[in-house]
Amino acid sequence: SPTGGFFDLGMDSLMSVELRNRLNRALSGAYVVSNTAVFDYPNVNSLADHLAGELGEALGTGTPESLPRSSAPRPRQSPATDDEAIAIVGMACRFPGAPDLASFWSLLESGGDAITDGRPDKGPWAGMAGDPNADDIAYRRGGFIEGLDQFDDRFFRIAPIEARAMDPKQRMLLETTWQALEDAGIDPERLKGSRTGVYAGMGSSEYRDMLVAHGQADAYFGTSGSMTAGRIAYVLGLEGPAMPVDMACASSVAAVHQAAAALQRGEVDLALASGVNTVLSLPLMQFFKDLRLLSKAGWCNAFDADADGFVRSEGCGVLVLKRLRQAEADGDRIWGQVRGSAINQNGASADLPVPRGPTQEKVIEDALAAAGVAPSDIDYLEAHGAGTELGDSIELRAISAVYGRDREAERPLLLGSVKTNIGHSEWASGMASIIKAVLAMNSGIIPAHLHFRSPNPNFEWEHMPVRITSEMIAWPDTKGRPPLAGVNAFGLSGSNAHVILEGCAKDPASVNGTWWPAGSPQPIEVALPAALSGLPLSDEEAERRRARLWPLSGKTPEALRDMAMQYGAWLAEHSQMLEDEPAIEQLLADTTWTAGTGRSHFPYRKGLVFQDVTELQAKLKALSETASNVQSGRSDHGTPGVAFLYSGQGDHWVGMGEVLYRTEPAFRAVLDQCDRLLREERNASLLDVMFGRDGGDDLNERVWAWPAIYALEAALTALWESIGVCPTMVLGQGIGEIAAAQASGAFTLQDGLRLAASLTEPSEDLPQITVTVPNLTWVSSMTGQEVKSAEMLDNSYWRQLASAEVPSQDSIDAVAGTGVDLAIELGPRANSDSISVPMLSSGQRSDQPVVLVDVTQHPGPEAGNSALVFVEAVAAAYEAGVAISFAGLFAGEERRRIAIPGYAFQRRSLWVQNHDGTR
């Protein structure tokens, strides 16, 4: 792969020197490749871009626009301020009994308890924490992640031997970070080179002890906190800070604090804050047991008279954070806000692990001050609530001392702890609390705090305005302001952290039938090619697009199949929640927008074209049953080569392109411009003739047919380029040669139209037009050679070309034999005569044949309308591996980001082994 790292592919230092030497010999002094080039530009693409830029500078041709120099400074998005609110634009999690965000909320809402007597799945658990056969309940009981030994190593291009040496915390954090970015509607692959920071709350590695016990002492890369944060940045190509945050059980709230501060200081434009924990080590279990921190009964009874300790648990949570005003401008899905946060240390407490009330009060006060919020405004507090007799009492007094101020007795502070549901996930516990609080604010429901039967007798409940939410209740009335919640997190190391969260105002028009947030409607701009960027756009509102493209992709056929199944189930559930057809239609449009622009697109692809929900559901079901037959669309030599083929005269009809004219603004802009230009010369409307508005058949006359064909093909070129599909090669047939020349940059849209119109006149004199060197390969249909200068393009060339019925065989061979993977025919198709037909038998590679698609068809009884055919052609291009700018398929509309299913990881068991391969 051109994006795969040299050293990931097996290169070593000696090979890097040999590569440098070979490059320098090939360049023959035009440019000298440095000793560090393969380290500074670590894959084929980045090294090629670097060399192209340097060679262009050395030869005086400059750096190509498409190849940004790595030394160029990246502009910051906007000035940041110290008190700016921070938006939570994405979340993902994996906790006991809850492999994703939706199931986590379902667990909480139903009052579920995920603590189990031994791990819930079969795996290599003998002699580890969670071994169901262990005699001691402290060793057996806990909150365990199902499938902890499993990981999709192939998705992240990590060798199995390396994956086995990676702490499951690191592996879980990689997958969950990807899911959080997908939840944010951010294509993770677009973050390469971005100022995105990684702040990972995590502690020491219990897995490393297992590796050492199995004779694998060199496990630093896979087990250290710094390498975990660094690997996330490495995999995603992030260039902001990447740091582990280890403040024991306050770590993940502290990670949010650090991430928010970095955003407010302007150090980063996006931040990934996380917390992760696993429970593996029996000696560590014994240590906690000796400290009398673990519950003898195996329950987490926080704030109850029977509280005797906590139950250890596993988990991972990730937040995607952005400055609020930027998130609002970007139309992000905003789950909530981080209004303020604080961290501190107990200092000289009674003992290092002993909690201290005054410093807990201080951290809460500091967070409230940072948020600019009065204590009495906080509706709910997600407590640390570890379930220890001493810790619970100290925390309750600190909470009451701060949050009891000026609080009305009839409006007590509501209090709960997620630890009663999933146990104490330690380094990830604060993240579990934050995610629970955010979900509760969005839903308007506070889940029940479990196992609360008899209140802790060491706390004066009757005198304090605090109420434990022992039953699920509605979020209290906030009298028009957004809901507010606080989150406590205290560490055994004496660390304290507190964060103030604000919910978002509800959008009364739910776009997906649920309370899950949607982004604000975003107007999608029309992306005209640079050469046409000055064209005026029509003020008329475009007609509704009836055909949509739902892109699905995976790194394996199995992932594609599972994605189709997930989407099918999701679509069935959500479409049933919406009662009317317009709401379902909006849901489908927002879903395809989010799937196109907010997801990475992988080699195994399927583009599902549909016009209603029934058709889409049928296609998803069929794909889920046949996805194993889908072939990779990725070209063996990198980015697929695309040829635009322009058909000539004889293939036109009245009404050609009319549907696209009504639905596609980029297409319309070009036709409108051609109409204006020709109206000045002929005092008649090209569009009236093309669409038969006057009831005549003037389009059958060459004087109108030729400029109409040229205008149609130029408009189709602009339409394809507006969705990011640009040709690497063009070829025309007859009058289509003029459209090919215009697409190559040889002359302007206006000059091409003048030339096409003048060729219909008997005069030998043609208009004077300015011809420049093409900026891409234009193969002459007459000679079969690439056009590199204007000298051959005299009057006789164009006159002879206009009468040509088919391209020369040399030109067909030239296109088919030069690495083209996709040939797109642009022009009217009224019959079977096609410029692309000869390519079916010319130059085809048996291993990877050229994919041929056409864009318009005559509206006969067996052909669809041109808009549907266009979308089907885009789907074919997508499946062939061509990069699509999906925003172009929604130009002129307003669309929202919504929550849709994420990638279907294909996990397999990868666990520590002995040198002989046994576990």
Image (spheres, grey):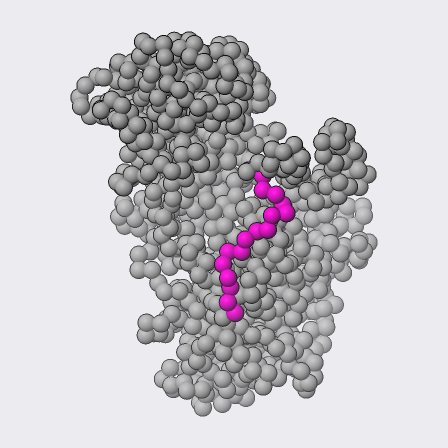
Residue 908 in picture, x, y percent from top left: 63, 46
Question: Which one is in front, 350 or 110?
Answer: 350
The part of the image, by quadrant, that contains residue 248 is bottom right
The part of the image, by quadrant, that contains residue 336 is bottom left
Q: At 26% from the left edge and 40% from the top edge, which residue is drawn?
A: 540
Residue 231 in picture, x, y percent from top left: 66, 53
Residue 35 in picture, x, y percent from top left: 77, 41
Observer able to see residue 422: no
In this rendering, the answer to whether 281 lies above or below 524 is below
Residue 888 in picture, x, y percent from top left: 41, 39
Q: At 54% from the left edge and 35% from the top edge, which residue is drawn?
A: 604
Image quarter (top left, top right, bottom left or bottom right) of the N terminus: top right
The answer to whether residue 71 is magenta is yes
In this rendering, the answer to whether 733 lies above or below 381 is above
Q: Is residue 31 left or right of residue 709?
A: right
Question: Which one is in front, 194 or 80?
Answer: 80
The answer to whether residue 199 is magenta is no
Question: Which one is in front, 355 or 147?
Answer: 355
How many numbered marks does the figure carry? Answer: 0
Q: At 43% from the left edge and 9% from the top edge, which residue is drawn?
A: 796
In this rendering, the answer to whether 178 lies above or below 783 is below
Q: At 69% from the left edge and 60% from the top edge, which residue is drawn?
A: 225
Question: Which one is in front, 80 or 911?
Answer: 80
Observer able to see residue 271: yes
Residue extending furthest toward the left = 695
In this rendering, the answer to whether 15 lies above or below 98 is above
Q: Is residue 798 left or right of residue 340?
A: left
Secondary structure of the magenta portion, mostly?
A: loop
Residue range highlighted in magenta: 66-82
